[in-house]
Image (cartoon, rainbow, N blue to C red):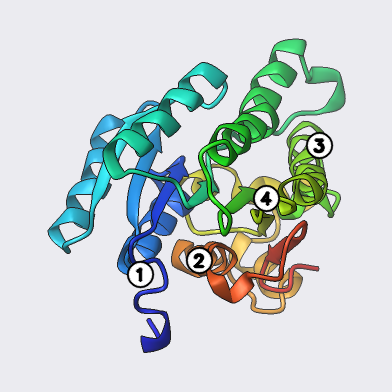
């Protein structure tokens, strides 16, 4: 980590939803390494969340895990309350919790819509609401979109729509919360080397290519950098948007997709 970034979040408190794995865990590690006290929100895998917290506290950070289903706004409010009770304030929200979905139009059921939007859209809206209610001027909210919100992917309509909603949230909340000195932005990751990607990365290929073109070869010709991102590379974007280095940036979605085309 560059020395200039070593303590950007000293004396600050960050809440990370979806913080027990993948990008969220990398964000928790990055913010903690730069001095933040972090609250790691997790839905089901307590062991993974506690492992993240143990690693951070072993390095001298202040960290705490809280179980939360962001599809339930009351639980999200309780998460923010616990963050304030434990560390005294909230300065940063990194809203990383999300669920994937691939499915043809004719196969999408109302229950699928409710599940995906409850986490990816409603969950992020109420995370922003309850975090902002406890933030002072200078607060930072970083939501999570996806490259899919701006690029057509076969059978990805439901997921992409939920992420496009997030980009609209960031844009519109920026005007409302800017009056209070709070910046709101979003990150749109591309393919990232996580356990979720291991399950679905090949589905980003057109169906006619999945059996004939190995994923690494496909990535090599559809991304300027020719590879999946590492979670730590995506976490660097969250750290930038959460920092004072991005003080004049709000309402925008930052694509971190390795030049996906």
Mark 3 vs mark 4: which is more N-terminal? 3
Q: Disc 2 and disc 1: Cα gap in Å?
A: 9 Å
Q: Are marks 2 and 4 in contact (CB under 8 Å)?
A: no
Q: Are marks 2 and 1 in contact (CB under 8 Å)?
A: yes
Q: Disc 2 and disc 3: Cα gap in Å?
A: 26 Å
Q: Residue at x 67, y 74 (%)?
A: 220
Q: Residue at x 61, y 58 (%)?
A: 191
Q: Residues within 10 Å of mark 2 (few under 14, many from 20)?
A: many
Q: Disc 2 and disc 4: Cα gap in Å?
A: 21 Å
Q: Which of label 3 and label 4 is nearer to you?
A: 4
Q: Quadrant of residue 187?
A: bottom right
Mark 2 vs mark 1: which is more N-terminal? 1
Q: Residue 132's x, y, as percent?
A: 59, 41
Mark 2 vs mark 3: which is more N-terminal? 3
* Secondary element type, mark 4: loop
Q: Are marks 3 and 4 in contact (CB under 8 Å)?
A: no
- Residue 31, compared with residue 165, is above or below; it is below
Q: Residues within 10 Å of mark 3 (few under 14, many from 20)?
A: some
Identify the residue position indicated by label 3 in the image. Answer: 161
Q: Residues within 10 Å of mark 4 (few under 14, many from 20)?
A: some
Q: Which of label 4 and label 1 is nearer to you?
A: 4
Identify the residue position indicated by label 4 in the image. Answer: 180
Q: Quadrant of the N terminus?
A: bottom left
Q: Are marks 2 and 3 in contact (CB under 8 Å)?
A: no
- Residue 217, compared with residue 101, is above or below; it is below
- Which label belongs to residue 34? 1
The answer to whether residue 20 of the structure is visible from this angle is no
């Amino acid at each position: 980590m560059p020395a200039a970034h070593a303590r950007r979040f000293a004396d600050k408190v960050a809440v990370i939803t979806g913080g027990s794995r993948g990008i969220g865990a990398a964000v928790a590690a990055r913010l903690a390494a730069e001095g933040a006290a972090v609250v790691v929100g997790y839905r089901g895998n307590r062991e993974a969340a506690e492992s993240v917290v143990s690693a951070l506290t072993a390095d001298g950070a202040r960290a705490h895990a809280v179980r939360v289903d962001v599809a339930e706004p009351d639980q999200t409010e309780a998460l923010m309350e616990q963050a304030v009770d434990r560390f005294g304030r909230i300065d940063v929200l990194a809203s990383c919790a999300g669920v994937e979905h691939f499915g043809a139009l004719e196969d999408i059921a109302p229950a699928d819509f409710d599940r995906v939007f409850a986490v990816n859209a409603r969950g992020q809206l109420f995370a922003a609401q309850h975090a902002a209610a406890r933030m002072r001027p200078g607060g930072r909210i970083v939501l999570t979109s996806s490259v899919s919100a701006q690029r057509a992917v076969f059978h990805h309509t439901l997921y992409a729509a939920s992420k496009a909603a997030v980009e609209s949230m960031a844009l519109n909340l920026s005007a409302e919360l800017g009056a209070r000195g709070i910046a709101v932005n979003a990150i749109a990751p591309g393919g990232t080397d996580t356990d979720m990607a291991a399950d679905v990365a090949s589905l980003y290929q057109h169906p006619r290519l999945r059996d004939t073109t190995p994923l690494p070869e496909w990535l090599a010709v559809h991304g300027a950098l020719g590879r999946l991102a590492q979670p730590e590379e995506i976490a660097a974007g969250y750290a930038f948007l959460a920092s004072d280095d991005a003080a004049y940036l709000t309402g925008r979605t930052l694509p971190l997709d390795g030049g996906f085309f």
